[in-house]
Amino acid sequence: MSYTAFLILILIVAIALILIVMVQNPKGGGLSSSFGGGGAQSLGGVQNTNNFLDRTTWTLAIAMFVLILLANFAIPRSGDNNFKLDNTLDGVETTIPATDTNPTTNDSLK
């Protein structure tokens, strides 16, 4: 799998994780209990919805962790391991900051 594919998967999992976390409330009174109004109580109850959201949160978090670790191995690297930092600033023009011989002060009394 390529690095770009891992990045896309990580982005999809991150968005899903954000949405799942925003929907749940640990006290059971969040958006999870308001799906379908009173019908949510008869279809499985708030407790089952919270269990599903909790499991989904943990699954997505673990999936993101694994994808990030796997993406590290998919980063394209050059075969040259001999890094030479001696000439990294060749061709870069540097300037010395101008010094002011008469510094200004905020004193109003002279």
Image (cartoon, helix red, strand yellow):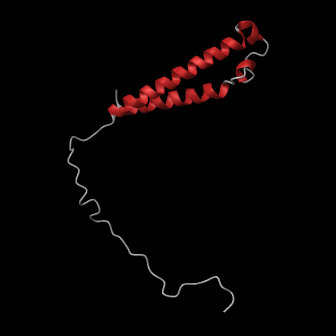
Q: Image check: 29 left or right of 99?
A: right
> Which residue is pictured at 42% across the width and 26% down the height?
66
Q: In which quarter of the image is the C terminus?
A: bottom right
Q: Nearer the viewer, residue 54 or 17?
A: 54
**Location of residue 35 in the rendering, given as x and y in whole percent from the top left corner:** 73, 18
Q: Image check: 30 left or right of 72?
A: right
> Which residue is pictured at 55% across the width and 30% down the height?
15
**Location of residue 88 by image quarter:** bottom left
**Location of residue 47 by image quarter:** top right
Depicted 57 relative to depicted 74: above or below: above
Farthest residue, direction right: 38
**Location of residue 57 in the rendering, given as x and y in whole percent from the top left corner:** 57, 22
**Location of residue 73 in the rendering, given as x and y in whole percent from the top left corner:** 33, 32
Q: Image check: 89 left or right of 27?
A: left
Count of marks placed on residues:
0
> Which residue is pictured at 66% across the width and 17% down the height?
50
Q: In which quarter of the image is the N terminus?
A: top left
Depicted 80 relative to depicted 31: above or below: below
Depicted 109 relative to depicted 84: above or below: below
> Which residue is pictured at 72% across the width and 20% down the height?
28
Depicted 67 relative to depicted 106: above or below: above
**Location of residue 58 by image quarter:** top right
**Location of residue 56 in the rendering, given as x and y in whole percent from the top left corner:** 57, 19
